[in-house]
Amino acid sequence: MTEAVSRPTLEAVAARAGVSRATVSRVVNGGDGVRESLAERVRQAVADLGYVPNQAARSLVTRRHDAVAVVIAEPESRVFADPFFALQLRGISKELTAHDNQLVLLLTEGRDDHARVARYLAGGHVDGALVFSLHLDDPLPGLIRAAAVPTVFGGRPHGSAPGGAGVAYVDCDNRGGARTAVRHLVDLGRRRVAHITGALDQTSAVDRLDGYRDVMADVLGGADPGLVVQSDFTPAGGERAMRELLDRCPDVDGVFAANDLTALGALRVLRESGRRVPQDVAVIGFDDMVPVAEQTDPPLTTVRQDIEEMGRLMARLLLSGLPGGRGRGRGTARTPAPDARAAPDGGVILPTTLVRRATA
Amino acid sequence: MTEAVSRPTLEAVAARAGVSRATVSRVVNGGDGVRESLAERVRQAVADLGYVPNQAARSLVTRRHDAVAVVIAEPESRVFADPFFALQLRGISKELTAHDNQLVLLLTEGRDDHARVARYLAGGHVDGALVFSLHLDDPLPGLIRAAAVPTVFGGRPHGSAPGGAGVAYVDCDNRGGARTAVRHLVDLGRRRVAHITGALDQTSAVDRLDGYRDVMADVLGGADPGLVVQSDFTPAGGERAMRELLDRCPDVDGVFAANDLTALGALRVLRESGRRVPQDVAVIGFDDMVPVAEQTDPPLTTVRQDIEEMGRLMARLLLSGLPGGRGRGRGTARTPAPDARAAPDGGVILPTTLVRRATA
C-alpha cells in the first residue's frame, strides 16, 4: 500500500456501522458503556474496512503511553557490570516488545537521584514501572507509592511479608533454594558448612541466609556463628569473605555462597590457598548465571533461578494489570507461569533447581 | 527544616521585590522580557528569602521535562554485550546527573522497533535525544527528524559530509587514528599490512578503512585488495576474518583491526596458527577499551579514543543547545572540550592517540 492510497477513517467506520464517531472511538479503545449489540456492529465495520486506529489520537483517548519504565536501584556502573540485570532486561524487553510497549530504562548515579526518578514516573511519561534491587533504607518504594504509578517489583520488597500489604512482585524461592544447596552439602558429608551472605539490606540475601540457618538447625542443631561471613554479592566481596573464613575456621569443608559472583571470588581464594575443590572444600553458588557459572574453575554447582523468565513475568503481570488488560489479561495474571506459586502476601514465587557441576 | 516550617512562597518574593507574581515567575524560569533592574531586584529577594521554585509548577511554565533520551540503534542484547556502550552511557549519565536531568534509555529488540522509539520521542516525554550506532539503511534519523526533538548523534551520521547539512554530532578522528596506526606498522618495517574492517554500514568503519587506504597509497603505492577483509566489530568476526586472511595472504606481517574486539579475535587465531605476535605479525586495534585491550595476550597496542568523554560531550552539547541553555550555555558549546575541533559539517571531532603495548 502506498502513501497515496487513503486509509479508512473513523468516520467511514461510523457510517458503515450506523453509529456516532464517539461510539466507534469508545469501542476501538476498549472503553465501556457501549451496548454489546452496537459494539458488535462497530467491530464488524472495523473488520470489513480494515480500519487501523491512529496511534496518537488513540493515546489521547486512552491516556496510554504504551511505555513501561524499568528502574534499577543501583548506580549505572553496577547495572552494566552485573550480568544479572542484563538477563532480567532481556526478558522484560522481549515481553514488552511483543506487546509493542516501549522499554524506558531510567538510569541513575546513585540513591540521591531516586527523587528525580520518582518525579519522572509521576510525570505521566509511562503506564507503569518495573522496579529492581531495593535496599532496606531506600526511599524509592515510598516515592513510587506517592507517584501512584502501577508497579511490579523484582524481588520481595522490604516490609512485604506473609499476610502483608499485597504489593505486586516476582521473586524466586530464595529460602527454599538455599535449603536445597545446604542440604546437598550436608548430604555430601560436610559438617563445617559456611555461608558467605549477600548484601543483607536486600531481602534475597536475608532469605538465603534464613534457608542456610534452617538446614543447619535441622541437621546439625544450629550453625557455628563463625561460619557465617557477611558479604555483598560481588567477586571482590567473595574473595575477602573467603580469606576471613579460612583464617577463622580453617577446617571449613563446605561453602554456600549467596550468588555465583561471590562463589567466583571464593573459588579464587581457595585455589590460591591450595585447597582442592570439591575434595577439601565443596562450593555451591546461587543464580546459575551463564556463562559465569560454567566458566569458573572448576565449573560451579549452583542453585538455578530463571532470571530472564522473572523479567518476562514481571512485564506480563504489569501489562495484564493495566487498564484494558494488555498482556494476557487479568484472568491469567494469577497463574502467570506454569511452575509459579502465589505467596501469601500477593507475590509470585518461581521455583529454583540445583544444577550440579564440579564444585559440589 | 521540618515539614511544619513553611517554605517561602512566590507571593512572598513578589511582595519583597515589589513586583507582580508573573514577573517573579518569568525571572525564576529564565524567561526574557523583564527589565534587568527589575530582574536584579527579584533575584535579590529570592536570595534573601531562600526561595526554592516548585519543580512541577516550573515544568508547566518551562515545558521542560529535565529528561534526555538515549537511543542506541542496536538490539538490547548487543547494548549489554559490548562495553563500548557502557562507557558512553557512563559519560552521559555523569553529565546529565550533574545537571539534574534524567537519563531515559530507550531499548529495542531490533530495527522493527525504531518507529515506536520515534513515537516515544515525539510524545513529549523528553527534552532531547542522544542517538548512537546508526547503520546505513536505518530509518531512525528520518523518524527522529520527523519527531522534531533536539538531537545530538554519537558518531558522524550517514549523509553528513564536509559541507553537509550541519547535523550535531560528536565523533573521534577515525580516519586520522587509522592513519596513525597503519603508519606505525609501516614504520616497524611491515609491508604486508592487512586491515580487518568494521561493519561497513557504519561511518566509523568506513572512515577507518579510508585512513588505512590513505597510508597504503602514500607509502606503498596502494593496498593489495586481498589484504582487506570485511568484518563486523565483534571478536567472532575478527576470528573469521583472520582465518580468511591467513588463508589468502599467508605472508601477512601486520594487521590493523577496526576495533579492539576484532583484534581480540584476530590474536586468538594467530596464536592457534602458531604465529608470534608481534615478531611474525604485528597487530593494532582501535578504541583502547579497558580492560579488553590490557588483557589480550599479548596486551594490545591500539588507537585510543576517549569513549566516556564522547558521551559526556554529547550530553553537554545537547543541554547547552536547549531553551534556557542548560549545561554550560551556548557560548561554550562550540569549544566543548580542550582538544576537540569542529568538523566542516558542524560536528565535533575528538582526537585519538596511539597507545603502545606489546602487539606492535
Image (tube, coloured by chain):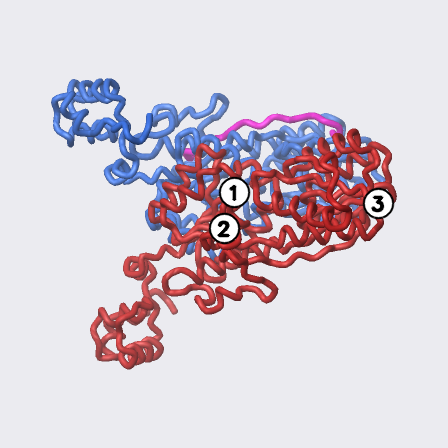
Chain colours: A red, B blue
First along the sequence among labels 3 and 2: 2
Q: Is residue A148 above or below residue B40?
A: below
Q: Quadrant of the C terminus of chain B?
A: top right
Give the mark nearer the N terminus: 3 vs 1: 1
Prevailing secondary structure of the magenta residues? loop
Q: Amino acid at mark 2?
A: Phe
Q: Specify start and end residues of the magenta stretch as a single range.
A: B343-360
Quadrant position of the N terminus of chain B in the picture:
top left
- The answer to whether marks 2 and 1 sit on the same chain is yes
Q: In this view of the protein, which residue sits in the foreground, B159 or A23?
A: A23
- Badge 1 density bin: few <14, some 14–19, many ≥20, Cα 10 Å: many
Circle 1: element type: loop
A29 or A284: nearer the viewer? A284
| Element under disc 2 | strand
Mark 2 or 1, nearer chain start = 1
Chain ID of residue with mark 2: A
The image's mark for residue A153 is 2
Q: Position of residue A254 (x, y in %)?
A: 79, 43
Q: Is A231 contained in the magenta span?
A: no
Q: Which residue is mark 3?
A: A278
- Residue B292: x %, y % from top left: 68, 35
Cβ–Cβ under 8 Å for marks 2 and 1: yes
